[in-house]
Image (spheres, rainbow, N blue to C red):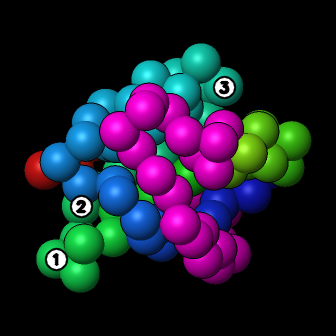
Amino acid sequence: MLTQKWLISGRVQGVGFRWSAQQLANQLGVTGTVQNLRTGQVAIVVTGEREQLVAFTDRLQRGLTPWITVANITKTDLPVHHFADFQIII
């Protein structure tokens, strides 16, 4: 089990990214949070098995919708944190 923080840049705000990421997280069975940052990036904190996290980032980089473009994902390992589900932080 791993917990990571991802900073995602690109066309990721105002295009349904957080909702789409939440739907994908639920499909993959990972938990955590997603929120917009004032920098124009999106932050995801996610907990899951390595294979789940790889599948998540692969899908993010391919684009969740035609309006979303992920330019870069910066990953940082964190101490394992157990979330109840995957939530959008407003």
Q: Quadrant of residue 11?
A: bottom left
Q: What residue type is disc 2 on?
A: Asn
- The residue that label 2 is drawn on is 36
Mark 1 closeness class: few <14, some 14–19, many ≥20 residues within 10 Å: few
Determine whether the residue tagged by mark 3 lies in a helix, strand or loop: helix
Q: Quadrant of residue 23?
A: top left
Q: What residue type is disc 3 on?
A: Leu
Callouts 2 and 1 close, C-beta under 8 Å: yes
Whether residue 70 appears in magenta in the rendering, the answer is yes
Rendered residue at 25%/42% (across/down): 15
Q: Could you tell me residue 58's position as x and y percent? A: 73, 45
Q: CA distance from mark 3 to mark 2?
A: 21 Å
Q: Which badge, 1 or 3, is on the more N-terminal residue?
A: 3
From the image, state whether disc 1 or disc 3 is nearer to you.
1
Rendered residue at 64%/42% (across/down): 62
- Report whether 2 appears left or right of 21: right
Q: Which badge, 3 or 2, is on the more N-terminal residue?
A: 3
- Report whether 52 appears left or right of 68: right
Is 28 placed above or below 49 here?
Answer: above
Q: Could you tell me residue 71's position as x and y percent? A: 53, 66
- The residue that label 3 is drawn on is 28
Query: Magenta part of the protein: which range?
Result: 59-81
Q: Could you tell me residue 60's position as x and y percent? A: 59, 45
Question: Does the rendering let one see residue 85?
Answer: no
Foreground of the two, 46 or 82 = 46
Callouts 1 and 3 close, C-beta under 8 Å: no
- The residue that label 1 is drawn on is 38
